[in-house]
Amino acid sequence: MRMNGKGLAGVLLWAVVWMAWAQNAEFLNVAGVRIPEYDEQGRLKSQLFGDLAKSLPDGNIEITGLKVEFYEGTQVNMRVTAPLCLFDRARNTAQSEGPVRIARDTMVITGTGFLFNNREERFKILKDVKVVLKGTRRELNQGRLP
């Protein structure tokens, strides 16, 4: 699956910058993380939330209770959630072996495990991918394609 990774990339990059000062520390735990990303006009583009962010000795960041919201105007148009995510600062990638959920108004994508590569702006769900389109039965019954 290919999605616009610029928003997620920016949010994760902000997380890296925000926690970079802890590079030499053995551990840093931060509860209730909220990292917003704004566009050039000062409008909110996305926000990363985490129940707990933990800087690991290898330089990676473990985020528990990950939720990323993407905005169109003032409305949330997509949410990505995962119970656990590991962000590799050196490679600029994020990954998880656990469940992931991507929700939009008309679609929900779920699966197990994901890889996000900021350099390639690519988000890939690894297995058990399920796509649910909302309202398609109604559209098909009315003779229209969704």
Image: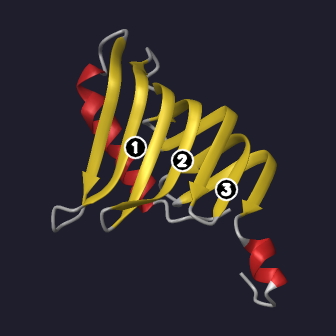
Q: Which residue is mark 2?
A: 80
> Quadrant of the rendered structure where residue 43 is?
bottom left
Q: Tell me the distance, in whole angstroms, between the alpha carbons under discs 1 and 2.
A: 13 Å
Q: Position of residue 40 (x, y in %)?
A: 18, 67
Answer with mark 2 or mark 3, whichever residue precedes in sequence.
2
Q: Is residue 52 above or below residue 48?
A: above
Q: Which residue is mark 1?
A: 12
Q: Name the amino acid, label 1.
A: Leu
Say which quarter of the image contains residue 61.
top left
Residue 108's label in the rendered image is 3
Binning the other alpha carbons within 10 Å of mark 1 as few (below 14), some (14 to 19) or many (20 upward) gives many
- Binning the other alpha carbons within 10 Å of mark 2 as few (below 14), some (14 to 19) or many (20 upward) gives some
The amino acid at mark 3 is Val
Cβ–Cβ under 8 Å for marks 2 and 3: no
Point out the tag, 1 or 2, that comes first from the N-terminus: 1
Per the image, label 1 sits on a secondary structure element best described as helix
The disc, 3 or 1, on the residue closer to the chain's N-terminal end is 1
Bin the neighbour count of mark 3 within 10 Å (Cα to Cα): few under 14, some 14-19, many 20 and up. Answer: some
Q: Amino acid at mark 2?
A: Val
In percent of width and height, residue 50 lies at 42, 30
Question: Which residue is at 53% across, 60% downward?
Answer: 120
Q: Nearer the viewer, mark 2 or mark 3?
A: 3
